Image: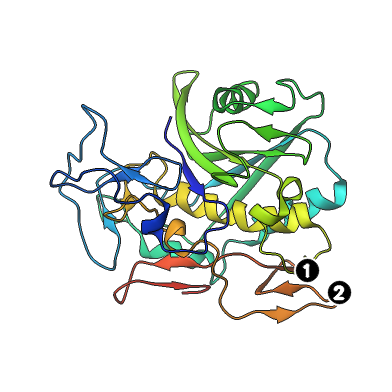
Amino acid sequence: MRKAVITAMLTVALSSLGFGQATRSGSDLVPNGKGQGVLAPPGQSNKARPTRGNGISFHGGPVMTTGPNVYFIWYGTWDSGDQSILTNLVRSIGPSSYFNINSTYYDGAGTHVANKVNYISARSDTSYSRGKSLSDSDIQAIVAAGSPKDTNGVYFVLTSSDVNETSGFCTQYCGWHTHGTIGGLDIKYAFIGNPARCPSACSNGTVAPNGSVGADGAASIVAHELEEATTDPDLNAWYDTRGAENADKCAWTFGTTYSTSNGGVANVNFGGKDYLIQRNWVNASGGYCSMSY
């Protein structure tokens, strides 16, 4: 299973995280979901000639041009205040000058991504139906339990701080996105780990703007996975020669910040709440990290 990720404590160049360790054979490396680019598996080579420019390339896969529909799955025990921080984020992130960065990406027909995010609904799994130690397949099973039908949706599994993801949460990544066949449909989904479990790995160490290490830290992870799932939902559309997707190219960079009333650090306000979320890669003017377009 391949996943697009935020690699924990990404404060060094991508090359030192394993990008380029595989031997390239005339084509781009593809995202492997662990912060590295790898050669495409047999039968899954780059079939389309990449469209290059601006530091990131289009490889022919589908793109969510109408904007993503967002579904939250609250797994474990969540505080209602933390839930409101993250729900407000996805309700308010699009349209915005921040999400408009994704409008610089397009599909094979040249249709650009709309500056739009639709928050649809949420459900809770307070019984820890798959336990507190989850595998990748458990995440898919949690999504499947809700009988997802929306192929233009992204189903986020947000875990409480007492839950671990055993394939590398807190050591290799803080979150990831992927897709899979569920009920005969191509369903896109994401895992969002709770930074309160490992704040030294999955938060940047500044005071949380809304007073919650878990929810405030998760806000940046949600934004990261949302923009990657929009522009590279099946992990075969937009990424660079090293297998980095748009948000990977700007991970753990925040641009200009300001102080909040509680002494926190933020860089954007959505829906009346302050957030510290990472920048995203603008696919224009040669390519650059930014908080707006």
Percent of width and height locating residue 166: 61, 30
Residue 258 lies left or right of residue 290; in this view the side is right
In front of the other: 251 or 103: 251
Residue 292 seen:
yes
Query: Residue drawn at (28%, 68%), measured in percent from left and top?
Result: 54
Percent of width and height locating residue 31: 36, 44
Relative to residue 267, is residue 281 depicted above or below? above
For residue 246, which quarter of the picture? bottom left
Question: For residue 207, which numbered disc appears in the image?
Answer: 1
Residue 149 lies left or right of residue 161; in this view the side is left
Query: Residue drawn at (46%, 33%), measured in percent from left and top?
Result: 179
| Mark earlier in primary sequence (2, 1) | 1
- In this picture the colour scheme is rainbow
Relative to residue 106, is residue 292 depicted above or below? below
- Where's the N terminus, which quadrant? top left
Query: Residue drawn at (73%, 59%), measured in percent from left and top?
Result: 216
Percent of width and height locating residue 127: 81, 23
For label 1, the SS is: loop
Callout 1 crowding tier (Cα within 10 Å): few <14, some 14–19, many ≥20: some
Q: Are marks 2 and 1 in contact (CB under 8 Å)?
A: yes
Q: How many angstroms separate mark 2 from mark 1 (CA)?
A: 8 Å
Question: What type is the residue that disc 1 sits on?
Answer: Val
User: Mark 2 — residue?
Assistant: 262
Query: Residue drawn at (45%, 27%), measured in percent from left and top?
Result: 180
Question: What type is the residue that disc 2 sits on?
Answer: Asn
Percent of width and height locating residue 20: 29, 51
